Image (spheres, grey):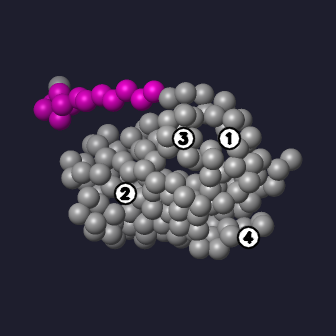
Amino acid sequence: MTDVAAQVRSKTVTWQDPLASARLGATMSGLEYMTAIAEGRVPPAPIAAHFGMRWEHIAVGEVVAVAEPDESLYNPIGMVHGGVAATMLDSVIGCAVHTTLPAGVGYASVELKVNYLRAIHAGRGEIRATGRVVKEGSRIAFADGEIRDAAGRLLATASGTCVITPAA
């Protein structure tokens, strides 16, 4: 066994049935649902457990998610994988849009453009992802996002488009 192989670490991830939460969420406005998740009354999406992400701020058209990346999220060259930033940005953009929707109306990401400005590393504190709706529409919504480190430095930005899926 090499020295590298001897340094094995592990991480346990637990989550609750996401479909049960989604069914409950369909009975609430997006703002009510996201607030219930942030307050711990409804379980978050499983991806939040993987990234250690929690909702810090929920308002109409704006959300903030916070996480403290660990080395289990590293890419092969020793920094947090860009997919983590992209996932967090997609999450805050989509959830910001969700806060503007009535009960029974959903959304899906159709486009995400990410700009990576600085590397993200474990052990440097929390990162904060903010999503804000730029333009609401009946069929399409546009939103922007950004990630900042604990010192307020801008790490990544994104713009995204979500399709609005009407109630059945």
First in sequence, mark 3 or 4: give its number: 3
Q: Earlier in the sequence, mark 4 or mark 1?
A: 1
Q: Which mark is residue 128?
A: 2
Residue linked to disc 1:
25
Badge 4 marks a residue whose secondary structure is loop
Circles 3 and 1: CB atoms closer than 8 Å: no
Q: Main secondary structure of the magenta part?
A: loop
28 relative to 63 in the view: left or right: right
**Sequence-earlier tag: 3 or 1:** 1
* Residue at 74% across, 60% down: 164
Q: Which residue is mark 4?
A: 137
Reply yes or no: does residue 5 show up in magenta: yes
Which comes sooner in the sequence, label 1 or label 2? 1
Q: Which residue corresponds to mark 3?
A: 37
Specify which label sits upstream in the sequence, 3 or 2.
3
Question: Percent x, y for residue 73?
Answer: 34, 45
Q: Relative to 49, is 135 above or below?
A: below
Q: Amino acid at mark 1?
A: Gly
Q: Amino acid at mark 4?
A: Gly
- Which of the two discs, 2 and 4, labels the residue nearer the N terminus? 2
Determine if the magenta segment contains residue 106: no
Asked which quadrant contains residue 1, the reply is top left
Q: Position of residue 138 (x, y in %)?
A: 78, 67
